[in-house]
Structures are given as structure tokens and as C-alpha cells.
Image (cartoon, coloured by chain):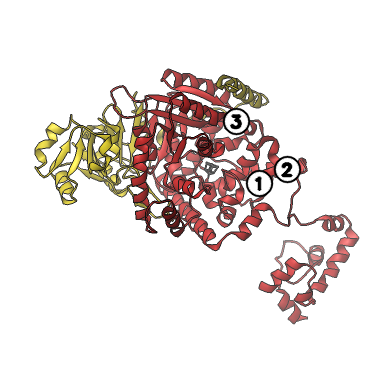
Chain colours: A yellow, B red
Amino acid sequence: MSSSDDRESILSRVRGALAPLHERAAMPDYTTELAVMRQMMGSRDALVVFAERLALVNGIALTDPVALVARLRENKWLHGYCDPALWPALAPHFGADFKVETTYDRKRVDDYAFGITRAVGAIAETGTIVLNDATTSRRLGALTPWVHIAVVERAKIFSDLPEAVAGLGQDTNVIWVTGPSKTADVEGILIEGVHGPGVQIALVV
Amino acid sequence: MRFQQIDQFAAELKADTRAAVYDGSKKGHEKRTKLLFDEYADPDRLRRIAGEVKQHVVENLDTYLPQVEAKLKANGVIVHWAATAEAANQAVLGIMRARGATKMVKAKTMVSEETELAHFLEKHGIEALETDLGEFIVQIDGDHPSHIVKPIIHKNRREIATSFEENGLGAYNDDPQTITRRARHFLRHKYLEADVGLTGANFVSAESGRLVLVTNEGNSRFCLAATKCHIAMVGIEKIVPRDYDLALFLNLLARSGTAQELTVYTEFISGPKSPTQPDGPEEMHVIFVDNGRTEVLASDCRDILRCIRCGACLNVCPVYRQASGHAYRSVYPGPVGAVLSPLMMGDKFPQKADLPKASSLCGACHEVCPVNIPIPDLLLRLRNRAKEENVPSPGTPPMGAWALLASQPTAWRASLFGGKIINYLPTKLLPIPALRAWEAKRSLPAWRGGEFRKWLKTRKGRANVSPPAPSRAEAKKAD
Ligand code: SF4
């Protein structure tokens, strides 16, 4: 059978299965306020909530590039990739001890200790960073290095999930990132940095 | 066979495995409850509404399926349909061959477990590598997942370390961090070499055609950053009407499944990569898979198609905790599996008709289900169906003698009186082996047959409560 035969057979079986129903379940009427965590935001500043929530999932929010550079140096994360559009503004903060490339070579995936790319926004309620194709210079550059630094604009922090869903836009690949990559597959023990970054930083500007 | 198959399996389970499953599932459940109830004003309403949304979708699939197909096509996605597991696997193989592709990296998808895709592709000379850490371990072990969210809940670190060693992934080391790093290192080169990335989808929005994938490890992200072609295998029931509804389900799924507020990665994919993006698939296929789902839709248990595969009902189930997932002989274990697996068998329903009986009907699964599926009711309907189809039920105690007594008042009264003899019988002489075994560990309550009738007859006015029954030992002493 071809896919189009299968299409017909599936749809006719679906119709046949539903035919005996006298009434079909109606779509319930609800507002997404239902799915907003209570008392999370209140009248608090979105950045404050975002930073606090991100810390709870072991992510790091920074507002000062100097603090970022100090942290990278302290951990000897000295070789990285940076979105070429971001580099001119960031370069003055990085010293000569760093090696930062603005092109990403997939053959040298293990060379990059960090990757700096732009985020399209963030979600305060959950400490989530929002990435998409339009603002990410390279999907691999944001994913394969041990440390990912997402540059988030302060004005683009959504307060909660329903708001962030409404703001998904037209991009074909939107990724919500909530903390570092992790697993608890082995005996339920939490380990960070499985396939994605083991350290997730948001640099809010 | 004296026992139900599932009981037999549970009885023979290694103590290690039972402990691993028990601890793992209990932990998941306790955290979940706290999260939901601390954070929402009305968590119960949240799951009721979510259930209604999915029920609406299930009962209107005839409209939603063509709608989502049209939307996907408009987004530049190639849509395929597969009525059976075999057809789904063939569709994947067809896409691989058309591209001359020989290497696939796979994210976790339950549909591909149903169709045994990885085995199938390997038989046809294609490497199909599982990339979810748990699934990867299951694959190198030639094992099966035993939980839909935590595939290796039944394994401990020593077993994992041994199989890593046997598979050339370094000398024996059972530190979970070392195990994870080794997998990270091995798999990242595999992603980069692969031609095709395969995923499932947790939700598909009919409105936008967006596929939503939730993961924690980042493996599906890697599949979709490193390869040039994306294939998504999707069960036909995965649809939600609008993007708007996604917030509701995303709030529930992670909390119910792994007691997280959100999983680490939530990906919204509506087509091949954007033209300006250097990485990622230029081609995207969605395969809609039936494989028994329309059988479920035609039954009076179609509510189970609301399931969002969170695993909460497994974690809370006293039978699952004792028996472990493999006891269910199905891709879907636990309460959800006890309903879904026999139904998906179609004509071969009797082969799994015993699963709905592996439940005490305690109702915990219904209480935790984020889409409010009345699982105990569905289990009863399936038990009834098995009875109507005369499916034999091994291990059921013979009830013929009881039926005879219960229908003859004189015989019943005589046996109630005669039963007193059991109070004086030494334990060794008890007539039924099961009773002897019971008595070896505990004492039977004293036989008080007929006393209820006496009490009822002499009862005056308001019900007065009879004192608790003395134990058999006490009764013996008193006499
Ligand atoms: S039946 Fe409900 S609780 Fe069980 S896996 Fe499905 S959605 Fe989760």
C-alpha cells in the first residue's frame, strides 16, 4: 500500500469509528489565566523574577559583560564561538588570553568551550531563554559548547508561558531553554550537560 | 499456568530491580504533587480542562487530521500516512533510500518503539542510533525500555557501567557523571556524521502545524542542528487545536512527568530550517501513524487517546511499582498500558486481555492523570470485554462452590455454622494451601459465621457498632 492508500484507509476508519457518536465533545471555553502560576509575578520586575527563576534551575543571569568575562576566565573557558554580529560590542571586554572565533567549524566541535548567540526573548515565570532561527547565528554554536551564553534584551522578557506562546511568531524553529541540559536517567541522579550545554548563562542587556 | 502472566513476572523479579523501580517511581510522584498544588490556584480544574480539550480533539479527528495535514504542507513539510507499524517503517526506509542515507540519529519516540524502527532499519543496513541516554543504554544492552519517560528505571549504575565496558565505551566506571560524559563524547560525533534525524512529537498544533518536542538532554536539538533531513513519526492523536492550548499542556506535562516546571528544552518546529540559518534540516517529513489507534477510537475506551504520555500513572501505580514495566509485555506499561496495549492489538485482544486485571482499581492513576482519564472505568470495561469474549483467565480462584452455597439458603446457613471448626483446627491441618501459608505469617481472624445475621435480627433502633472481631488465637483462649 502507498502512503495515499494509507491516508484514505486511516481517514475512513476514523470516520467509521466516530460515526456512531450522537454528540461530539465540545471544545471547552477557558482562558489561559488558568495556567499561570499564582503569585509568581505580582508587581515585581520581570528581570528580577527571571534571574531568580533561572537560578532555581541552575542557570546564571548576568547583566554585566565584565562579570561574564571574569567567570569564563576563572573556569579557563578561553576558546569559544561568538555570533559575528555580537562580537564588535563584546570584543573590548575580552582579553588577549581568549581565542574567540566568529565562524563555527563543525569539524572542530570539541574546540569550543563556549558559544555566544542572541536570544529572541525570555520568560520570567520559568527562567526560560527563548531562541529561534532568526536570531541564532548557528544552531550548533548555541548547542555544542559546554557553556552557552544567550544575549537577551531586557525589554523582551515575557512574564509567563501563555504570553510566550502568543509571541511565538512565524519562526520555524523556536526553542525554549530552561537551564542547562540534564538527565536523571541513571538511578534518578541529576547530571548536567548531557548533549547540550552544561552551563547556561543569560547575559541581559 | 497457575498465575496471571504479570503476577508470575512480578514474583520472579530480582530484588534489585524491584527496589530501583519502586524508589524511582515513588520519588517522581511525590515531587509532582507538591509542584502542582503549591503553584496553581486550581490544579484540578487545569487537568479537567486539558482532558476536555483532548477529548474534543479525539472525537473530531476526522476534521483535525486533514486540517493539520494542509497546514503542514503549506509550511513546506512532506506528509506521509502509515496505517500499520510495517507501513511506518517502510515510509522511513523509503525516505532514507531516496536520499542515499545510511546513518540516522534518533531522539526518543514511543511510536518508533511500537514499530521497532531501529531493528527494522538495522536489518536493512541502516545505522539507527538512539541518542536519549536511557534509550542508548537500552539499545547497547539489547534490552527494552520499562517506563515511558524513564526508560532505564529498572537498571542500576553497576549494570550500566558493565555494558559500557562491554561496548568499548571505556573501562568499568559506575559514577553516573562519568557514564554521562562518555555518552556525550561518543554521541556528539555520531550526530555530526548522521544524514537524518528522527524525532516524535509531543503535540501538533492544528492551527499552525507546529510540532512541539519536549526533552531534557538536548538530544533532539542536536538531531535537528547536525543533520540535513528531519523525519517526525507522530501518532494520529497528538493534535491540539490551537497554539493557545499549548501553554495549558506544557504546564501540565513536565510537572506530571518529571516534576519539573518545564522540561529543559521545549522545541516548536513548524518546518525545515529558515533559509538564513546555516544548520539544520532542509527537508522535513511527518509520518502520521495509526498502528491500532483507530481500533481504540472505535471502542468505548477512546478516552485513553487523550494520553500525553507523561508517565504519572506508572509512577503512582502500586502494581507497576511492584511488577516493573517489563511485566506488561508491551511498549506501554502501567495503567495507561493496561488499557492501551490490549486495545491496540485489534483482533489479538485476548493475548493481552489479562493486563486490565493487573489493577486494584484504587483510582490513583485517575487522580494524577493530567488529562483526567478515568483509567479504572476503562479497565473495568476491558475486563468485561474479556469476559464476553470468553478469554480464559488463569489464576482466578474457582468460585463454583461459593456460587452454589450462595444460591441455597439452607446450605449457606449450615456452612456458616460448620465453618466454626476452623477455630479449633491446628494450622497444619487447614484445608487450603494458601490459607496455611497465610497462617504461617499472621493469624486468621476468628470465624464468626452467622453472627451478623443474629445481630441483625436482634438489633433495635439505631445501629450499634459491634466490637472488633477477636483474633483466632484470642477466640481459642476464650473458649
Ligand atoms: S494516562 Fe494520563 S497519567 Fe498516564 S501517561 Fe497518559 S497522560 Fe500520563
In the drawing, does residue B274 fall left or right of residue A82?
right
Q: Residues within 10 Å of mark 2 (few under 14, many from 20)?
A: many
- Distance, label 1 to label 3, CA atoms, is 24 Å
Q: Are marks 1 and 3 on the same chain?
A: yes
Q: Which residue is mark 1?
A: B356
The C terminus of chain B, quarter of image: bottom right
Could you tell me if residue B423 is visible in this image?
Answer: yes
Q: Which residue is mark 2?
A: B386
Mark before the other along the chain sequence, 2 or 3: 3
- Distance, label 2 to label 3, CA atoms, is 24 Å
Residue sitting at x 59%, y 46%: B335
Q: Are marks 2 and 3 on the same chain?
A: yes
Mark before the other along the chain sequence, 1 or 2: 1
Q: How many marks?
A: 3
Q: Secondary structure at mark 2?
A: helix
Q: In this view, which residue lies farthest toward the front?
A: B125
Where does residue B176 sit, x and y in percent of width and height? 38, 55
Q: Are marks 1 and 2 on the same chain?
A: yes
In this rendering, is residue B82 above or below B113? Answer: above
Q: Are marks 1 and 2 in contact (CB under 8 Å)?
A: yes
In the drawing, does residue B71 fall left or right of residue B375?
left
The amino acid type found where label 1 is placed reads Pro
Q: Which is nearer the eye, B193 or A102?
A: B193
In this rendering, is residue B275 above or below B196? Answer: above
Q: Are marks 1 and 3 in contact (CB under 8 Å)?
A: no
Where does residue B404 sit, x and y in percent of width and height? 87, 56
In the drawing, does residue A24 fall left or right of residue B478?
left
Q: Are marks 2 and 3 in contact (CB under 8 Å)?
A: no
Q: Label 2 is found on which chain of the structure?
A: B
Q: Which residue is mark 3?
A: B84
- Distance, label 1 to label 2, CA atoms, is 9 Å
Q: Secondary structure at mark 1?
A: helix
